[in-house]
Amino acid sequence: MDKDKMSMAERRAKGLLWVDTGENIEQQKFARGLCQDYNRTRAEETEKRVEILQKLFAFCGDNVWIEPPLTLAMGNTVSIGKGTYMNSNVTLVDDYEISIGENVLIAPNVTICTTNHPMHYQARLHGEMYCRKVVIEDYVWIGSNAVICPGVTVGRGAVIGAGSVVTKDVPPMCFAAGVPCRVIREITEEDMEEFAPIPLAQD
């Protein structure tokens, strides 16, 4: 297809430069309004929180808990699996798809970003941007103040150290940290033994 004839949504999906459209801006108003409503809820208003999250995201599984405040742009580009927990001040730069798996732990002040801008200023004079999908697989733990950059996949069971800037994919079942983030070591059965016996969850 001729690039000049593509819609902004098609350009965004193909990783080409695009700019916000009226439709996007309306969705942002809707999502940010819901997000403001969520951030004003009290901890005991669990049913209200669940109701808002179901409206806000493309998919939100059971037993998802997000500590306010939450910041995002679109909402409908984000899916979150069951049992996931996000601590306070998480920012989702979700102009494109963010897929967060099941039983993920996200610490305070984490940023997950799908969007970048061209390096040269003349290519971004009108807010031009490009996007890459971010995937956080099941059982990942992301430490405080980490930044997950566009196009990154964090593999199942991986742990991202606090303050890391993740610019490349992280394999499953490893501990990665640093700026830029790099694999430090594998996560093994010895990591289970460190805290054995594991206490049973209380009802």
Image (spheres, rainbow, N blue to C red):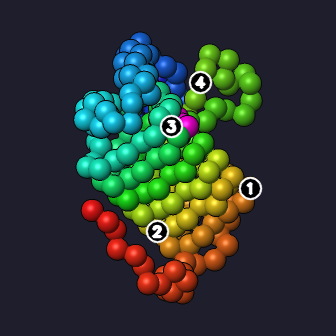
Q: Decide which of tag 2 and tag 3 comes sooner along the chain.
A: 3
Under mark 2, the amino acid is: Gly
Residue at point 52% right, 40% down?
Answer: 88
Horizontal side of 182 relative to 198 (left or right) equals right
Q: Decide which of tag 2 and tag 1 comes sooner along the chain.
A: 2
Please, what is the dominant secondary structure of the magenta stretch?
strand
Q: Which residue is mark 2?
A: 157
Residue at point 31% right, 33% down?
Answer: 45
Q: Which residue is mark 3?
A: 92
Question: Residue 186: where, in percent of width, then height?
Answer: 58, 78
Which type of secondary structure does the marked residue at label 2 adopt? loop
Q: Which residue is mark 1?
A: 179
Distance between the alpha carbons at the discs numbered 4 and 2: 35 Å
Tell me, yes or no, whether the two marked residues, 4 and 1, touch with CB atoms within 8 Å.
no
Tell me, yes or no, whether the two marked residues, 1 and 3, touch with CB atoms within 8 Å.
no
Badge 3: residue crowd in 10 Å (few <14, some 14–19, many ≥20): many
Tell me, yes or no, whether the two marked residues, 4 and 2, touch with CB atoms within 8 Å.
no
Horizontal side of 172 relative to 75 (left or right) equals right
Q: Which residues are magenta?
A: 89-93
Q: Decide which of tag 4 and tag 2 comes sooner along the chain.
A: 4
Under mark 1, the amino acid is: Val
Under mark 3, the amino acid is: Leu
Question: Residue 25: where, in percent of width, then height?
Answer: 44, 16
Quadrant (top left, top right, bottom left, bottom right) of the C terminus: bottom left
Which type of secondary structure does the marked residue at label 3 adopt? strand
Q: Decide which of tag 3 and tag 4 comes sooner along the chain.
A: 3
Distance between the alpha carbons at the discs numbered 2 and 1: 21 Å
Residue 91 lies in the magenta-colored region: yes
Q: Nearer the viewer, mark 4 or mark 1?
A: 1
Q: Is residue 135 above or below residue 170?
A: above
Mark sitting on residue 128: 4
Horizontal side of 111 relative to 66 (left or right) equals right
